Image: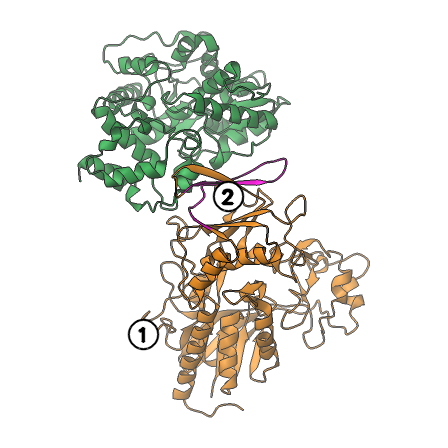
Amino acid sequence: MSAEKEAAVKSTKAYYCVECGKCTGICPVSRGLEYSPRRMVKRALEDPELEFVRDSQIWNCLTCKLCSGVCPSGVDYIDFIRIVRSRAHAQGLSGSCSQGGQLSTMARMMASDRLAQGRNFWTEGLEVAEKGELMYFVGCLPYFDTVFEDLRPDTLDIARSTVKVLNAAGIRPVVSPAERCCGHDLLWSGDVESYRALARQNIREMKRLGVKTVVTSCAECYRTLSRDYKEMGADLEVKHISQLAGELLDQGKLKVKSSGKKVTLHDACRLGRHTGVYDPPREVLRKVAELVEMPRSGPAASCCGVGAFLTCGAHSKRIQVERLIEAGAAAPVLVTECPKCQIHFKCALRDKPVPGAKLPELEIIDLSSFLARNLEAGKP
Amino acid sequence: MKDVLVIGGGVAGIQAALDLAEKGVKVHLVERTPSIGGRMAQLDKTFPTMDCSICILAPKMADCADHPNIIMHTCSEVAGLQGEAGDFRATVLKHARHVDASKCTGCGKCAEVCRLKGRIPNEFDFGLRKRGAIYLPFLQAVPRVMNIDSKKCIFLTKGKCGEKQLCKEACERGAIDFDQKDETVTLDVGAVIVATGFDLFDPSGMFEYGYGRFQNVRTAMEYERLICASGPTGGHLEVEPTKEHPGSMAFIQCVGARDLRLSPFCCSVCCMYATKEAVLVKEHYPDTDCTIFNVDMRALGKGFEEFVERARDEYGVRFLRARPGQVTEDPATKRLTVWYEDPASGKVTSMEADMVVLATALVPGAGVAQLAKALGIELDESAFFKVRDPLMSPVESTRPGVFIAGYCETPKDIPESVAQASGAAARAFEVLKRKGGAAHA
């Protein structure tokens, strides 16, 4: 058995698979595309050199982790897919990025040592620090507004809102001009080498700035920094803004008012099933709005339909439209915890990609943005 | 000759108690709940013969009540066991029933007037029927004595129940006794038989099947009550909200069982009871479609394979080797959709069902660790009671003089539990004989 196969089937417990097909039964991709997690595992087990990685099906997985959540054998299928994709990448293969490779190219460019980014242009009027123990990891937000200009997602509003919330609690977070993409998409696209280069640079920069705690407004950054950077030797306390805001609210350092609105929450895969953060966003939201749960929420939440900008197609659109209709039935406002979920949903809401499907009137807003709009005026 | 202590009043405990009593041994039968009968009393029919479960069990329960050599201690728990084989002292905690068993006839007039009547989910029907604070656990309960739920009773929790205690007023025999206290008794016994059965795994935590959220997703034990003529619907299977009988049913096997994260073991009875439950649907409503989603069919008892074949060929039950990944509900109609990978095509397929029945894992009881400690015996890695040697001493616990019978030792069906109970009774009798003395009676 090759070392890669060993990693793919042993560390992920894929060899425990008893072919019950429960994973395929819940997989959102299998309902629309020629794809079966069970068969993927079976092929890996029967294929000594993992030649099956040449099959483009390996790029269909959304890595949403619904399958692992129900697997009676405890197979870590998304980790399995990550390893399989890294093997494919090593053979020069890749999935077809829905943005023509633009986002992954930008991430790879950021891996360069000699890089001068003008990424902090948005901090004007906000209190940020150059050095300190608490850092706000902004992630790709300054880039999304440019790439998705036509959609006007205003993702920078998420960044500004996050800092506003922190400032309201008397916190001046570090915002580093040398921060780079966390590497999430590259890691899940199989480009482990570039991911590692980004991770090393971010970890080095955080060390240089004396950072001990990192707060993120992005579910993917949260997973990558809290889980994957640990494997790279990072010694950091990582918090999603919902966790930190919850603490600040409990301590009375942050004061909010009720919006009087009815909202529903879309759990991001990376925050929910990947890292088990289900309650903090809900506790924070309940302080500013009336939270109505969708039928599929928490561990059962649906995926936003796209993983690592790899899989956007007609079926992704169907997943999004279904979710938007579900959200609309629950509340007029859909709150997201991850900027990418927001982009994907806004895209589907604008494009109306499924003929005949009646999309609801829906306001889609990020948790940080929603919180910042409902801060009690004046510092406590 | 010394007495024997039997812990657990299910079919295994009942059999062990009757065997010993017939040999002239005095038996103390300790049961945690207000009535003996256990799980078998809750079942509608038994496989593969389709006998009425309570019709078989009720005479044995009555025999226990009437036998001169059997002393029943209901609402009771064993708290400790000192001494050695042939000479034990067992500490038994008897919870107050607040009803004098020597006076109560179980007429139920008190229950009719209880201010909480119809407000508390009853245990026997898994909450499908409601009871009051004073109640008879079920129709065939033994002993036929009313019981007061001390955690719910208004008088016992608040010290006052309206103007007067209506139950006390209704009782013509003055059997209600609010001053009754818990008491601890010590029993001198020569041997102990543990037959505490199983608990049911709660599937609400498995989000994929929607139990607890979707009204028409039921556990197999709930289904047993629903299809039972003496159950909450009089045996009519009703789908919410239409109250019509189901046109299509799905049975999902191994829910929480054969699952490395929950209970890794096979519960050994679910393949057969699901087949029985599907046949029951077909007997009630021949037009209803029944599908049993199984991991593999385990039909290894006498007549079992034939029973499965009859279910398939004569009754038209469909058996599908697949573990469904998800059950979804149409919020408007409450109709369910079961999603699974079709074993023949390998494609994700869905089927609509009016009712889904989950064969939930049958797991060691919640109190086994505490009981094992009280008795000084060991549990195995799955929290079943450990036997000294699974090959040659399959009824002996790790402490001499203490024997194990029924499901609490390892998953097994009714006849196997009965056989093991008789085996345990025989071994217990040997201990008494070794210590000498003449039998009672």
In the rendered image, the residue lying farthest to the left is A2
Q: Position of residue A101 (x, y in %)?
A: 32, 14
- The spot of residue B370 in percent (x, y) is 46, 63
Q: Quadrant of residue B170?
A: bottom right
Q: Which residue is mark 2?
A: B209
Q: Looking at numbered disc 2 in the image, what kind of residue is underneath it?
A: Tyr
* Image quadrant in which the N terminus of chain A is located: top left
Question: Foreground residue, A132 or B38?
Answer: B38
Residue B165, image x and y in percent?
78, 62
User: Tag 2's secondary structure?
Assistant: helix
Relative to the observer, which residue lies in front, B208 or B4?
Answer: B208
Q: Is residue A186 visible?
A: yes
Give residue B251's position: percent from left, percent from top: 51, 50
* For residue A380, side relative to residue B342 (left or right): right
Say which chain is green. Answer: A
Seen at 39% across and 73% down, the residue is B395
Q: Chain of mark 1?
A: B
In the depicted structure, whether residue B387 falls above or below residue A119: below
Q: Which three-letter amino acid code belongs to the residue tagged 1?
A: Met
Q: Which residue is mark 1?
A: B392
Chain B shade in the render = orange
Q: Secondary structure at mark 1?
A: loop
Q: Is residue A176 above or below residue A215?
A: above
Using the image as rendered, state which of residue B52 and residue A267 is in the foreground.
Answer: B52
Q: Earlier in the sequence, mark 2 or mark 1?
A: 2
Magenta span of residues: B319-342
